[in-house]
Image (spheres, coloured by chain):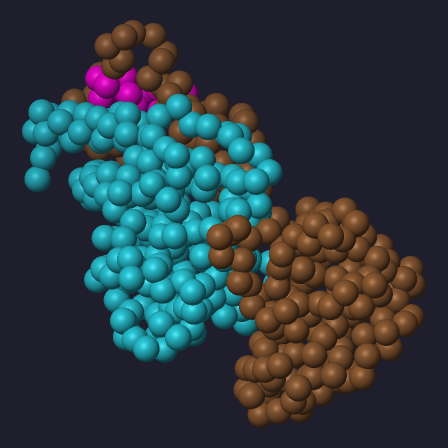
Chain colours: A cyan, B brown
């Protein structure tokens, strides 16, 4: 399954066209659009120039969750270095071989946020890691197509360079399985009264990100859910259930 | 002397603006224009967005010879692989360290041809080498600003080299902390009767490896151990402890 380039809530259709062109020049083919403001659109077609085949085959979906549900590795892009996120921030160069490996084992996606504000926290929750594109710290205003181009360029270079490095033995678990694991974990945390003093979903999010980073395969998800079920079963047998 | 980016006989002023923006995002500042069709121009300014300072300082000269007269290393860019040229063709990645070295010793320039036809033979005669930007062989139509961006990006990466890649926010937890987490996890698995049917430490090892792969920091170890303690406390309060 080719690497999926997912543009979230793109405002300007011209940017979709320019991104399609950038993808095609770098040998990529898979464009997904999450709730674009306007698509199809004449401006997108105009800026795609010879890449209108990518536009014609672009998948439009209402949510990011749908776009990445069956992907094993999902990387979000961020212009700023978000210090509140507990992931290692990777460069596109470092991530490119991982994306290629995941492409062969369960599918991979790179996600680009909306033009001004980037990805939301909810979007980042669906990602396993964060890409930061190196740029001038005083003027980081890469536009969408430029960001898409750099990531696709690094994937092209990595494919040329080290063809078959870093292969995984089992396919990565898809995002929907990780979401089920997260929901299950949320249940258990509540049952054992392990709540976040700062309130809100912060703690659960942080735990889920640890699993996102680890790159779980399906069997590992099953083991972890088995542990969670055992915690619940034991508590219920002990008569302390809700 | 900063690396000079020389655009030769650019037809569309918008491309000059977009190139200026690409340069600025990648931390470059030196734009030279050889006989542009129209400059200054409102379209150039519009597409430069925050990079109008580069446009304001751009040097306009009538010939390429003038633009590169005092440079020690001049590399021409080419979309096609010109087999009639008897130079080794370099990638921007391979050339970037050479450009940086030349920048410190005598000056360096990268030269970009006109939109449709690229550099002329006479232009190439002024160059010391040829850059070919990797692209999809079936669709190599990088536009001018995209080509400028890739070259400037590679120079930025070569300058940064290692320092900025993959940086973590918090130091990784030391191995002894991971060992304590593993022992604690082992205790809890036993208490909740989650045993490995295949016997032995296989399951615990597998779980520990997930955490090993995730690259936990100290705070994350603390959170996970907090969850384990909550599981134990809850069971003990429920009176089902050993």
Give x and y (percent) for residue A163: 53, 33
Give x and y (percent) for residue B54: 70, 81
Between B29 and A78, the one lying in front of the other is: B29
Can residue B48 be seen here? Answer: no
Image: A61 above or below A184 = below
Q: Quadrant of the C terminus of chain A?
A: top left
Main secondary structure type of the part rendered in magenta: helix
Residue at screen point 45% across, 42% down? A99
Between A38 and A174, the one lying in front of the other is: A38
What is the span of residues highlighted in magenta in the rendered image? B183-194
Q: Quadrant of the N terminus of chain A?
A: top left
Between B91 and B236, the one lying in front of the other is: B91
**What is the count of numbered marks?**
0
- Describe residue A153's horizontal placement relative to residue A215 as left or right: right
Give x and y (percent) for residue A3: 39, 46
Residue at screen point 39% across, 23% down? A169
Give x and y (percent) for residue A109: 37, 48
Residue B79 lies in magenta, yes or no? Answer: no
Residue at screen point 66% across, 73% down? B114
């Amino acid at each position: 399954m080719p690497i999926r380039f997912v543009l979230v809530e793109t405002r300007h259709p011209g940017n979709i066209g320019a991104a399609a062109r950038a993808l095609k020049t770098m040998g990529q083919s898979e464009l997904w659009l999450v709730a674009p403001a306007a698509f199809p659109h004449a401006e997108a077609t105009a800026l795609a120039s010879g890449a209108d085949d990518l536009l014609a085959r672009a998948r439009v979906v209402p949510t990011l969750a749908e776009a990445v549900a069956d992907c094993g590795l999902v990387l979000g892009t961020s212009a700023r270095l978000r210090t509140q996120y507990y992931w290692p921030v990777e460069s596109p160069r470092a991530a490119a071989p991982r994306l290629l490996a995941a492409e062969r084992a369960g599918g991979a996606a790179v996600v680009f946020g909306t033009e001004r504000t980037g990805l939301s926290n909810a979007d980042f929750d669906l990602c396993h890691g964060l890409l930061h594109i190196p740029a001038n710290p005083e003027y980081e205003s890469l536009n969408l197509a430029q960001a898409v181009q750099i990531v696709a360029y690094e994937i092209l270079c990595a494919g040329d360079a080290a063809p078959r490095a870093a292969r995984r033995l089992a396919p990565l678990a898809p995002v929907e399985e990780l979401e089920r694991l997260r929901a299950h974990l949320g249940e258990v945390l509540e049952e054992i009264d392990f709540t976040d003093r700062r309130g809100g979903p912060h703690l659960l999010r942080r735990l889920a990100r640890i699993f996102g980073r680890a790159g779980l395969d399906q069997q590992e998800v099953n083991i972890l859910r088995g542990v969670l079920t055992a915690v619940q079963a034991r508590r219920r047998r002990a008569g302390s259930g809700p």
